Amino acid sequence: MALPLSDLLLLGSGEKKLAACVLLLLLELFMEGADAAAPSQADIDNHLELGKDFLARGQLSDALTHYHAAVEGDPNNYLTLFKRGTVYLALGKTRFAIQDFSRVLELKPDFTAARSQRGIVHMKSGDYEHALQDFELVLREEPQNGLVHEHYSRLRPAKEQWELVQHLLSNNDEQNAIGMITQLLEISPWSVAFRQARSDAYLKTNDPLSAIADLRQVNRLSQDSTEGHYNIAQLLYNIGHATNALKEIRECLKFDPEHKLCFPFYKKLRKVEKQLVTAETAREEKQAPECIVAGEAVLKHEPEELMIRYEAHKLLCSCYTTDEQYGKALSHCKHALDIMKDSQVYCDRAEALLGSEMYDDAIHDYQSALEIDENNSRAKEGIQKAKKLQKQAERRDYYKILGVKRNANKQEIVKAYRKAAQKWHPDNFKDEEKKLAEKKFIDIAAAKEVLTDPEKRRQFDNGEDPLDPESNQHGFRGADPFAHFQHGSPFQFKFHFN
């Protein structure tokens, strides 16, 4: 800060010289600032020309930057303000467009082009009273203005229709109100009030996705408010769209990292979304244990929100079925279907029922899936598979014979086969038990043949027995039951028949 003159007089000669230098430096900086704050007319003209060029190329943001600079250089030039207002209008920044057009009309009240543009902005924003006023003044000056006549003729019916919409909403007639608001939005696409009203109506008619689409427009027209992002995130979370909700809440935190509503919601949402994504990825990659751990974690983190819990139950229904934990699978399938009927969940439960050998119930679930989606190929194929498995249940189940899961690999099957063959070798038994052991031994050999042959196993998994003589297949039945062990057997068998 510069010293007062009285203080300067008390300084020594050296100090006076230093103070004088400081004053000169401050004065020089002030003059430079003054020069920078007052651009020349040439600078203003250059900004206008560049703004025009960018506008012609459709680069609106760049054009706006130069018009800003031109207005700062000459804030009372109504033509420059008008040009900037039109760019604001093209960018959908209605509030700023109206401010510029209003300033133009303060400087030049008879500039009908600005009044006409402002009337259009009012009309598209749903402010019919101000739009009528502007259009009436334009038509006094230009009674033959066809475009303004056309706009003007639509305003009074639109105003009356909005009044009717409000009456319908007050009487809980949302369905008819939605149709009328949609018509009004053709005239007034920038109306926050109309879009908010339709969003609320969509929510009451159980159409949250349409409600969210309108809320996004409300938020954009309101210049991205934190409250808007929070409300959208909540709605997305309520319908089970955790990933999209997380994206929305992050937009809120960009404006206010410590927002009192967005930040705590973000911390919870991040945990839930991570586990849901992990579970879904594991399910797609057939990693059932990982899917189960993540799905159970979701239920732990979210004890209340139904649709998030639905997503978790749906994943666990599928993954517990894949892991052949059919009891737990059926429990989660039921919880999911209690929240929302879904054809794929019905198919998942049907698979669990098949694993539990409840064939009639499985067929019923596949039929329920078809009632929801008549083109569900999984359900159609499932019904045929269930019927074959039901018929097959009367015959041999090769998985049960070897005591392996249906998803066992070849190594596990061979290991189980060796163990069973050693246990049921006929030489280990006598008399009547020997006859039972021979039958068991034949079934064990048949099970190994089918389950270690990819094509035969595929047939069996689809409900067909490739060794069933009724299917014209040649297998152990009717052939030498022990021919299979003549080559490559891990055991040395010796039979003693009486």
Image (spheres, rainbow, N blue to C red):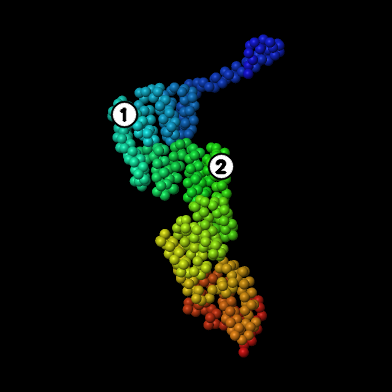
Which badge, 2 or 1, is on the more N-terminal residue? 1
Q: Is 209 positioned to the left or the right of 247 in the image?
A: left
At a point 59% along the width and 60% down the height, the residue shown is 289
- Between 306 and 435, the one lying in front of the other is 306
Image quadrant containing the N terminus = top right
Nearer the camera: disc 2 or disc 1? 2
Residue situated furthest front in the rendering: 171
Does residue 67 sit above or below 261 in this rendering? above
The three-letter code of the residue at mark 2 reads: Phe
Residue 218 in the image, given as x and y percentages of width and height: 44, 39
Q: Label 2 to label 1, Cα distance in Å?
A: 49 Å
Residue with the mark numbered 2 = 263
Residue 136 disc label: 1
Amino acid under label 1? Glu
- Look at the numbered disc 1 and give the secondary structure of its residue: helix
Q: Is residue 111 visible?
A: yes
Neighbourhood count class around disc 1 (C-alpha, 10 Å): few under 14, some 14–19, many 20 upward:
some
Q: Which quadrant of the rendered structure holds the C terminus? A: bottom right
Q: Position of residue 243 (x, y in %)?
A: 52, 48
Give the residue at x 60% y 83%.
Answer: 433
